[in-house]
Amino acid sequence: MRIAQIAPLAESVPPKFYGGTERVVAWLVDELVELGHEVTLFASGDSRTRGNKNLFQPSYSPGSYLAFLGRLTAEKGPEDAIRIARAAQMPLRIAAKIPRAETAYFRKHLEPHLDDEKVRLIGEVNDASKQPFLAQASALLFPIDWPEPFGLVMIEAMACGTPVIAYRSGSVPEVIDDGLTGFIVESEEEAVDAVNRLARLDRRKVRERFEERFSAHRMARAYESHYRQLVDGGALWETTE
């Protein structure tokens, strides 16, 4: 098939740093080409696909810190992550972008808690540094306070074999298999308890579940199936008169 993919112009495909949509488009385009399709990508001029695959190798060691990855905004829950890590007596490593509009929030609510030992801000990570950052973590903290439509970082962590501890909000119950790929919690107290139960999880099974549900190959196959239905005039085109 000849397939056109259209991506937002705000970031390159794949993005150098932050950019969930653009990263998914890159994975999809590369996998569709791998499946033998002729794909044209409409994106920013600095985009590169085929050979630029965003790849996450798993680690099955327990990890030595808790990780937070995302924008430093209140709705992403960085303050909760700091409190959870301190209560669980675990180091917290924060890999995050500080949006220009959130500078005041960062300075008032987050910067006073950074000490370079227990709570460390390592800055924004690219794809090369993101993999070891997630793979070497005991768990990813995802204490969001908004209806997150997906949360790509959750499956990136799972691809590394790293379980996720997340608040029950937005897509979290659809992404995390509670007790298998992480824990879904309702409060900071439950999150701290979940940290203490991480040893019960098998990081190999976390990776296996990622491959079953969220790999780029599986995604591309699903898109391919829908495209064929469209080409064949299948059910996706049917309307009622």
Image: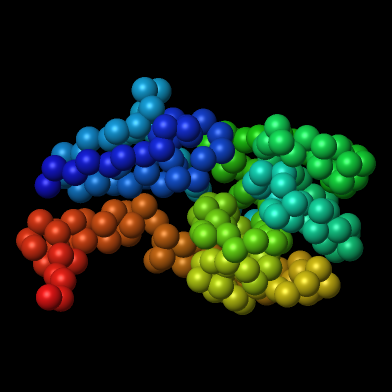
Image position, residue 150 (x, y; %): 51, 59
Q: Is residue 138 at least partly visible in the picture?
A: no
Q: Looking at this rendering, what residue extends furthest in the top direction?
A: 45
Q: Looking at this rendering, what residue extends furthest in the left direction?
A: 232
Count of marks overlaid on the render? 0
Q: Determine which quarter of the picture holds residue 99.
A: top right
* Residue found at x 29% / y 33%: 42
Foreground pick, 94 / 169: 169
Q: Is residue 225 at least partly visible in the picture?
A: yes
Quarter of the picture holding the C terminus: bottom left
Foreground pick, 153 / 91: 153
| Vertical position of residue 143 compared to residue 55: above or below | below
Decide if residue 4 is on the left or right side of residue 82. left
Q: Determine which quarter of the picture holds residue 21.
A: top left
Q: Determine which quarter of the picture holds residue 126.
A: top right
> Coloring scheme of the render?
rainbow
* Residue found at x 65% / y 71%: 168
* Residue found at x 29% / y 54%: 220
Image position, residue 155 (x, y; %): 52, 57
| Vertical position of residue 175 compared to residue 126: above or below | below
Decide if residue 3 is on the left or right side of residue 69. left
* Residue found at x 62% / y 35%: 125
Image position, residue 227 (x, y; %): 18, 56
Foreground pick, 132 / 20: 20
Image position, residue 10 (x, y; %): 47, 32
